[in-house]
Image (cartoon, rainbow, N blue to C red):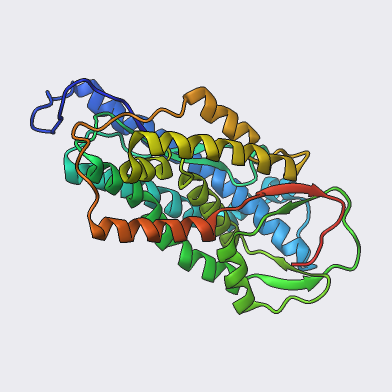
Amino acid sequence: MSEEVQFTQAEVSTSSLPPEPLYEEKSRLVVPALLFLLTILTTMAAGFLLHVGFLSSRGEAAGDPLIRVLTHPMQLLYGLPFCFTILSILLGHEMGHYLMCRRYGIRSTLPYVIPAPPPFNPFGTFGAVIRIRSNFRDRRQLFDVGIAGPLAGFVLIIPALIVGLSNSAEFVMTDSLQDALEFGEPLLFKLAGSLFYTAGDGSHISLHPVGWAAWFGMLATGINLLPIGQLDGGHVVYALFGPRGHRIASILTFFTLVGLSFYSWPMMGYLLFALVLVFLGFRHPSVSVEPIPLDRKRIIIALLGLVIFVITFIPIPVRLIEHFGRL
């Protein structure tokens, strides 16, 4: 996910910008580094809890997670596979933006990963962002920076999904679980799961923690490719169709998110996210040179981005159900 700050100058390049003070250079490194270290801790803890849940779902003795950690603190290292995978996907996504900014001389921050302690957040993070501090010269720069993140993240999701599913287990529910959370499955997950497992009546996949990291990566990718506001998908739509097309797409996407939220009652799905987007506004900063259209190569890449959005977007990420249904 990227965030822009509009400047008044017609064009910005690294050679024309004054050097930043030393304290600003240090802060550019200190804050991302501290957030990264905190997110390592929170995602490792989340990975440990997912590991314990994975063992329990397979009928293996897992015990109380808190007691296990207090008596054997090194058991937290069982969360490392999840931690490494989810951070690789998130940072890979944001580094795609960052490196493309560097290519065009666009000033930006390093990626910020956002920690979220479990069990408040079962994945240990709210994702990652990058702040772009100068404007785009034309739509081609905007498109390249916007699409680079989802493409880079998607490349890392594929091996994570394969490893996660190959180490998962299939089992049959014998008892109904009341008031259980059901996580939605993106199309890519369904297609990949059908290659590894043949689901029968009452069957369910006990997903390995690495598989959960891939699931979260797909969730983040699908959300970022939404054609609204200053999300990656918003950048792509603006580059393709200009300000008018971007505004129409943003409004339609907002009402779609609100509609989808009511299908996941009482979790409300994307409703809070849609309200945050309203608060931030649908407006997209203009580029310095508007008339430059995208070339055929970028149109093809845009179609690839659309395919990635279709196979990673989760219409209902999580909902409360009375019992688990079929896979």
Q: Nearer the viewer, residue 2 or 85?
A: 2
- Vertical side of 263 occupied by 17: above or below: above
Residue 89 location, x and y as percent? 44, 54
Q: Is residue 243 left or right of residue 159?
A: left
Q: Is residue 196 left or right of residue 232?
A: right
Residue 198 figure quarter = bottom right
Residue 70 figure quarter = top right
Query: Which residue lies at the image location 26% right of the left edge and 28% below the top edge?
Result: 26
Query: Which residue lies at the image location 27% right of the left edge and 34% below the top edge?
Result: 108
Q: Nearer the viewer, residue 214 or 137?
A: 137
Position of the C terminus, as image quadrant, is bottom right
The total number of labels drawn is: 0
Query: Which residue lies at the image location 90% right of the left edge and 60% below the top edge?
Result: 176
Q: Residue furthest right?
A: 175
- Vertical side of 21 occupied by 2: above or below: below
Residue 2 appears in view: no
Residue 34 location, x and y as percent? 41, 34
Residue 239 appears in view: yes
Q: Nearer the viewer, residue 295 or 314?
A: 295
Position of the N terminus, as image quadrant, is top left
Q: Residue furthest left?
A: 15
Residue 283 location, x and y as percent? 41, 27
Residue 157 location, x and y as percent? 47, 61
Q: Is residue 69 left or right of residue 161?
A: right
